[in-house]
Amino acid sequence: MRAWLSKKWFFCPVEKPYLFPFMKLHIFNPEHDISLALNQFRFTPSNNVVRMRKDLAYIPILWAGEGDYVLVDDVEAAYRSADRLRNYIKPGARFIGYNRLKSVIREKIRSGFFDIKAEPWGWDKAVVYQLKSMGWPEEHLPTDDQLDEIRNVSHRRMAKKFLDTFNEDGGIVFDSVETSSVTDIMQWIDRYGTVMLKSPWSCSGRGVKIVDKERLTPTVLRWVENTIAQQGSIMIERYYNKLLDFAMEFNVEEGVAKFVGYSVFETCVTAYSSSMIASEDHKREILERYAFPSAIDETMSRCEDYLSQVLPKAYSGAVGIDMMMIKHEEGVMLHPCVEINVRRTMGHVALALPVPVLEPERQMVIEVVRNFALRVI
């Protein structure tokens, strides 16, 4: 199987390096948000996260460019997994294992021309430590100060600050507060009945609890206390009647954000499950069933401005802002910021897949049976 895959779809001829003067090393590190929370160079992720990283390590092949590398534990297994998605993969990228990558790094350093740029799912101390341990030159990695900046803007308080700019307009107030007090949680439940509790660094439904008086159990209170002890605070948000999950995805070059596409996705309770694959026009049409075009356009513009203002000037990479269409007392409206992900998202993955020609939409699904698997249905 690999013989024809490597030649037809993935192989980049080393005899012609001048065709690819600059290449990328793509790394899928789904433990990124855990690393941000712990803020450590070394830690042991849960078995579930380790399995997810191993099973889905191949997915950067979907957006990797010609001549790029994708780091995986098992090269042969990666080719087998990628074979299931061969209709969605552009030719030219290749998988590389850890030992071979170490050799490539040494060869590049000896040559005096280090022409590889690391591009992980998200930048954090753990992935920098991993690259350094393989010999990656320190000058080609983010500095400690830059990592601290990325961690700071990944905190959920940055979403609250963005929401506050909308609240200043005098319209609907998107209530959110950062606290280290259980009393505040009780007061919010008294005010709204149901609230969302969110740990400062978490994503895709992890570290999120939907709570009311009945669900504020001793187990949840222990989780709150542990979160405050480990991360310094907890976020409380009003619970909204959600009608649609969606996101705006951005690409950032040296701190300047530009919109690249919409993501319309589904969740199971609070956890991500699938993304729509469709044209931008089709996704926009869906959004306009809930919100005026002017509201969508203004939100997009304000996202670009806010991200360009708060992101480190040296940051280049993907950013996604999750949003909702909600049913409010005053009608259906656009909730402009559920969370800000300073990393690649599943929405970016869906944008990397070709739009179906004969169907208005398809779904990109992350399945979990015995293993994690990405399927297009």
Image: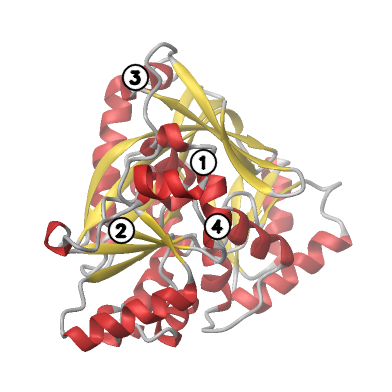
User: Residue at the spot x=85%, y=62% of the render?
Assistant: 219
Q: Residue furthest top?
A: 358
Q: Which circle, 1 or 3, is nearer the viewer?
A: 1
Say if mark 1 contacts mark 3, CB within 8 Å. Answer: no
**Amino acid carrying mark 4 in the image:** Glu
Residue 172 in view here: no
Instruction: Tell me how far mark 4 sits from mark 3, CA to CA.
Output: 49 Å
Left/right placement of residue 371 relative to residue 297 reads right
Q: Are marks 4 and 3 in contact (CB under 8 Å)?
A: no
Badge 3 is on which residue? Answer: 292
Which of the labelled discs sits on residue 68, or is there none? 2
Comes first in the chain, label 2 or label 4: 2
Q: Earlier in the sequence, mark 3 or mark 2?
A: 2
At x 81%, y 68%, the residue is: 222
Amino acid of disc 3: Phe
Tell me: residue 67, above or below residue 276. below
Q: Secondary structure at mark 3?
A: loop
Q: Amino acid at mark 2?
A: Asp
In terms of depth relative to the viewer, which is nearer, 100 or 284?
Answer: 100
Q: Measured from the top left, where is residue 30 in percent x and y?
A: 55, 60
| Relative to 311, 122 lies left or right | right
Mark 2 falls on what kind of element? loop
Residue 76: mark:
4
Give the CA separation, mark 1 to mark 4: 11 Å
The residue indicated by pointer 1 is 83
Pointer 1 or 3: first along the chain: 1
